[in-house]
Image (cartoon, rainbow, N blue to C red):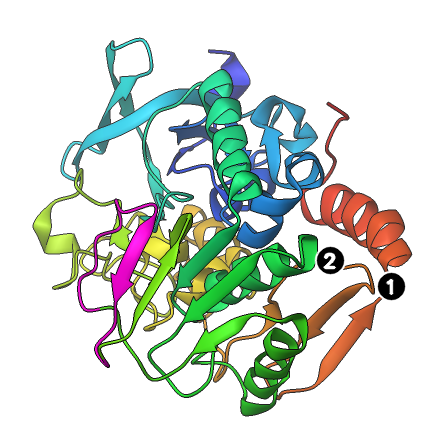
Amino acid sequence: MTEAKKNKPTVLILGMGDTGVLVATRLSRHFNVVGVSTKPNLLSGQELGKRLTDLSWWQTNYNTPLTQFKALEAVTIVHGKAECVDVTANTVTVVRIDGETESIGYDYLVIASGTSNGFWRTDRVQSSREISTELSNHAERIKSASSVTVVGGGPSGVSVALNIKRKDPLKQVTLCISTTMPLPGYHPDTRAFYQSALAKAGVETICEDRVTTVDESQSSGSLTLASGATVSADAIIWTIGRRKAHTDFLPDHLLDAEQFVKTRPTLEVEGTDNIFAIGDVASTDPDRSSARNWAYSILVHNLKRKAKGKPANKHYQPPAKRWGSIVGPQEDGLTIHQANGKQTRLSKRLVNKLLLPVIVRRIIYRGVRGG
């Protein structure tokens, strides 16, 4: 380790997904930053529908080797998985991808380890080749299916159903939701917009009915609904929002009843003085919305203050309604739905020439090298 790094406090970030990377890029100038990642890439959990129907585009924008981020040049990346956190000794035991165990000390710990949610968000330690093979297999399964049933009416379910149907109008696509309209938690205007879009595209939507037996390992065949009806498909995709927090390595006193990290509005972990949590793993609100909404800037601000001996003074305030893009860029552009129900439409050209290369890669991520 260089003398400069020795003189800086060490920030250890567990999880290098979207929020972990954003925190690391903002702290790397001021701290000795170490990131522990189960993947060598930033493998985003966003835009599942595009991931399954337009893999080449998705890979370019949502599967990025961590070595390509310019602002991570000074960050030490450990490819492995946290096994145990000792909050008294300020150390984390990590099992690396090669099977070796390493103990890493920290001055400040950031928990950004995320959650498992369906097949597209896991904490399995994987190589780049394993990731690529898995992505291709999932996309090929959908491409070869003549009928697809999607279970769950949240943003992932709506994105999958609508993107598949628009990609191949001849496919039979069925969306099963337990509510009267898709997208609970979004503004009523947004929900109505996508109920209409699904119908216009030809997606068969079954509302106010539940699958009687939930088995997320079932990838095809028949499903029985509470009403007694059955649906059959060559491919079944479960998007029912059963999230499991990646917190097995943490002491129980840091976790709530659902095993999410107990987090104060400052994004500090309750009962600690040098640990923060952010993203899907943090119990900031029922939607775990600090994974979005620029919460990383609040965490960075508060951590810098703590390092100067000052109390954290910025609070994260969850939005009243969910917002954002639901289905990703389409042929007519990208529609962004605001929390108040209003829409903003960006042209496809604007997305490809300005939003992704300039605003996202250059400004938000502070520079991403070409692959």
Q: Residue 123, percent across and down?
A: 32, 36
Q: Amino acid at mark 2?
A: Pro
Query: Which picture quadrant has residue 74?
Result: top right
- Give yes or no for residue 225 being in the magenta stretch: yes
Q: Position of residue 253 (x, y in %)?
A: 9, 54
Q: Which residues are magenta?
A: 212-227
Residue at position x 57%, y 34% from top?
A: 28
Graded by Cα atoms within 10 Å as few (under 14), some (14 to 19) or many (20 or more), the crowding at tag 2 reads many
Quarter of the image for the C terminus: give it: top right
Closer to the camera in the image, 179 or 126: 179
Q: Main secondary structure of the magenta part?
A: loop
Residue where numbered disc 1 is placed: 347
Observer-nearest of 17 and 235: 235
Percent of width and height locating residue 220: 34, 47
Instruction: Give the structural element (helix, strand or loop) at label 2.
Output: loop
Q: Quadrant of residue 263?
A: bottom left
Residue at figure coordinates x 17%, y 41% from the top left: 248
Real-space CA distance between mark 2 and mark 1, rounded to the nearest whole angstrom:
9 Å
The residue to which callout 2 is attached is 329
Identity of the amino acid at label 1?
Ser
Q: Nearer the viewer, residue 75 or 282?
A: 282
